[in-house]
Amino acid sequence: YAPKGCKYNPLPSFLNSRAFTSYTGEVRVNDVFGLQSTVKRHILRLDVGTASLLTLQVEVHRDTPATLTVDAYRRGEVGKPSGRVLNGANLLGCGGDDTKAFLHGLLSDKDLEIDIVFE
């Protein structure tokens, strides 16, 4: 038995579920998720059917001494500079410098399957 490390639900790995997708096809997730401190990288998969506008904002808990970056890559090209679709920006958050990340941009028709990387 291992004690639960966080009182919040874990960050999902896929956003293709009907639980996250509305009848219009819009994916909206407004919740508090937890990520264990031992996890250095989390990949969230997102598949869209057509060119789409992506807006993502994440922030670490104010008591967590960690920084956070978020970028979007074409599926299977995580870490490759040529595979990066959207580059996230780090901002001042409640926990200090670089504790909030913001990602915003258009996903073109050739970028319908992406991996959103939290590091």
Image (cartoon, rainbow, N blue to C red):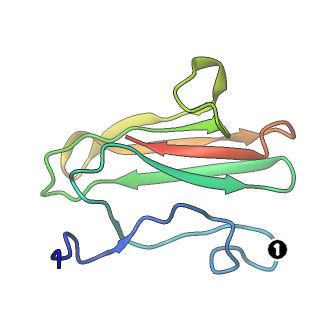
Q: In this view, does 84 lie to the left or right of 25?
A: left
Q: Is 34 or 61 nearer to us in this picture?
A: 34
User: What residue is shown at x 18% (from left), y 57% (from top)?
Assistant: 62
Q: Is 13 or 111 nearer to us in this picture?
A: 13
| Quadrant placement of the N terminus | bottom left
User: What residue is shown at x 87% (from left), y 52% (from top)?
Assistant: 50
Q: Position of residue 68 (x, y in %)?
A: 33, 41
In the rendered image of this protein, does residue 85 appear above or below residue 109? above
User: What residue is shown at x 28% (from left), y 54% (from top)?
Assistant: 60
In the rendered image of this protein, does residue 76 appear above or below residue 82? below
Q: In this view, does 101 lie to the left or right of 44?
A: left
Q: Is residue 78 left or right of residue 83?
A: left
Residue 74 lies in what quarter of the image? top right
Q: Position of residue 115 (x, y in %)?
A: 60, 45
Q: Mark 1 points at which residue?
A: 24
At label 1, the amino acid type is Thr
Residue 3 lies in what quarter of the image? bottom left
**SS under mark 1:** loop
Q: In this view, does 118 lie to the left or right of 87?
A: left
Q: Position of residue 106 (x, y in %)?
A: 73, 40
Q: Is 47 or 107 nearer to us in this picture?
A: 47
